[in-house]
Image (spheres, rainbow, N blue to C red):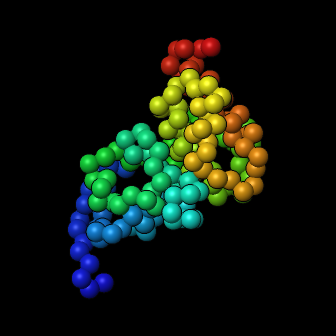
Amino acid sequence: MEGTSKAIAQLHINGEIRDTVIRSGDTLLHTLRNELGLSGAKRACENGDCGACTVLVNDEPMHSCLTLSIENTDKMITTIEGLIDSPIQKAFVENWAIQCGFCTPGFIMNCQGLINNHPDPDDATIEEWMQSNLCRCTGYAEIKAAIKAAIQESKKQNGKVI
């Protein structure tokens, strides 16, 4: 594209420094999927309504379709690919918190953000955090059960069995 500035940038993703070429208007979602081959964050609404593209930026859930790549060069980014074998991912599988699977990576990332920020959330906090993601296939009960199971597992791993 003529007139579009490009730059080589370093992004800290899933514990690694990754070099990539970005244009000034590239969203983080575009860079993750199209430049770095990390396809776990899903392209769906592209306006922040559904949460399918959720990643963690400095441990906070972020809709990657709403943030520019260039704004994240000095931040820690975690994608679903960086949560392999995590308690929340295992809890989603064990509690059947998936249907078609399209929204699942975004939900897992959002739930990991919840656990990072609220290690012992009450039901109201869980409900509030779940509102940022949409699923068209399930009634959310299994997702809530997965969150609670992951919280219990996290407490066990941190020596705080309740």
Q: Position of residue 8 (x, y in %)?
A: 23, 65
Q: Position of residue 21 (x, y in %)?
A: 29, 68
- Quarter of the view holding residue 15: top left
Quadrant in which the C terminus is drawn: top right
Write the residue at 60% across / 38% down.
Answer: 128
In the image, residue 58 above or below residue 36: above
The mark tally for this picture is 0
Write the residue at 54% across / 14% down.
Answer: 160
- Can the viewer see residue 36 in this picture? no
- Quarter of the view holding residue 59: top left
In the drawing, does residue 56 fall left or right of residue 50?
left
Quadrant in which the N terminus is drawn: bottom left
Write the residue at 43% across / 41% down.
Answer: 60
Of residue 100 and residue 54, the one placed in the foreground of this image is: 54
In the drawing, does residue 125 fall left or right of residue 22?
right
Q: Position of residue 67 (x, y in %)?
A: 39, 58
